[in-house]
Each structure stands twice: as structure tokens, then as C-alpha cells.
Image (spheres, rainbow, N blue to C red):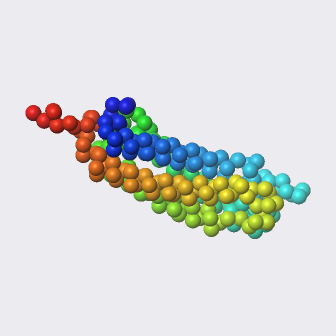
Amino acid sequence: MVDTKLKDGASAALWTCRLFLYTVVLAFSATIIGLDGRKADNIWNDALYYHGKVVNFCAYSASSVFEGGDHGACKYVMALASISLILVFFLWLASFVDALYPILTKFWFVELGINIFLTMWWLVGAIVVTAKRPSSVVMDALHITKDINSIEGLSWINFAFTLFLCGVAAVDGLLVGDKTSSSGKQNTGANNA
């Protein structure tokens, strides 16, 4: 693994940055799934017991607890983080596994395309999560202010990190990618006989 990734300073820096950012986006996406899907957090609870009544509840766009909010938004937040988790996991795996990394650097434009998609995906998602924020009355009544703020913050951070990953993929492909052969090993020029 070290042999193919850390040939020179630029390769090492890009690989480290890429692996770190993919790991963080994975962790943040999993956290969003956990916060949105855990019934005890009351962001999305189809059997919320509130003041003697069972409510089918989603916090997004809710102006009162009994209203129930926008269930489509809760499903969207779950899909937002789940799809990102799956795509980023494969990119993380390709960065981490020695046999797959040469393929990733050779087809850097595919990684760039996926990262552009993820950047747009998280931009739209972060805007939706922020726009569908529940009223402060609902957040205070159910004590979900920290959870809602966490989902919003992590969504915006994932947007920023995937935007940065677009730059990493482009730099890696344009500047470093042409220094490697199809095996992923750096071309030193000594084998040009």
C-alpha cells in the first residue's frame, strides 16, 4: 500500500487528504443516518407518544408536535446520507486498498465526476435540511435542538468536504496521475529503454 501511494510528497499529501476527507464524510453521513433514524431522538418517530396521544411525527417543517411535519423530508434526509455513505465508501475503499488505488488514479475523471455529483447532492441536501428546519417550539418541546443543529452542520460540512475532494481528484489526476504507469507505480524514466 505504501509503495503505490507515497512515492513523492505530492502523491502522499493528496492520498492522505483524500483518505482523511472520505473517512470524515463517511462518519458524518453515518451520524446523520443515526440521528434521523433513531426513534428515541424524536426527529422521525412514527409512534411518538406526546401528551397522551400517539403522533406520526417528523420534525422537518413541523410547526407543532401534533401536526407531524413533512415525512418526505425525513425520508429525503435518510436517502441523502445513505446514498452518500454508499458512494463514499466505494471511493474510500478504492483509496485504501492497494490493488484498487492504481485504477482510481488512472480513472481520476470518474472519481471527479462522483465528487461533483456528491457536491451538488450535499448542497441541495444542506439547503433542504436548513429550509425545512422545525419551529423552535417543536425543538424545545422535544429537546431536539442539538440533533437538528447537528444534522444541518454535518450536511454543510459534507458539502464543503466533497467540494474540496473535487479539487483533490482534479489535482491528483492532472498533476500526479500522469506520473504513474498503469500499474500505479511511479514512472521514473529508468524503464524507458
Q: Residue at x 65, y 46 (%)?
A: 34
Question: Who is closer to the viewer here, 100 or 154?
Answer: 154
As drawn, which residue projects farthest toward the right?
52
As drawn, which residue projects farthest toward the left?
193
Quadrant of the snapshot with the N terminus: top left
Quadrant of the snapshot with the C terminus: top left
As drawn, which residue projects farthest toward the front?
9
Question: Who is closer to the viewer here, 120 or 54?
Answer: 120
Asked if 156 appears above or below 173 in the picture, the reply is below
Question: Who is closer to the viewer here, 138 or 178?
Answer: 178
Q: Residue at x 57, y 56 (%)?
A: 155
Q: Residue at x 51, y 57 (%)?
A: 159
Left or right: 167 as drawn, with respect to 80: left
Q: Is residue 79 visible?
A: no
Q: Residue at x 67, y 58 (%)?
A: 149
**Quadrant position of residue 91:** top left
Q: Is residue 171 visible?
A: yes
- The picture places residue 82, in percent across and down from the top left corner, at 56, 49
Asked if 169 appears above or below 137 in the picture, the reply is above
- The picture places residue 55, in percent across and down from the top left corner, at 80, 58
Left or right: 50 as drawn, with respect to 21: right
Asked if 47 appears above or below 66 in the picture, the reply is above
- The picture places residue 174, in percent across and down from the top left corner, at 28, 51
**Quadrant position of residue 179:** top left
Left or right: 147 as drawn, with respect to 173: right
Q: How many marks?
A: 0
- The picture places residue 33, in percent across and down from the top left corner, at 62, 48
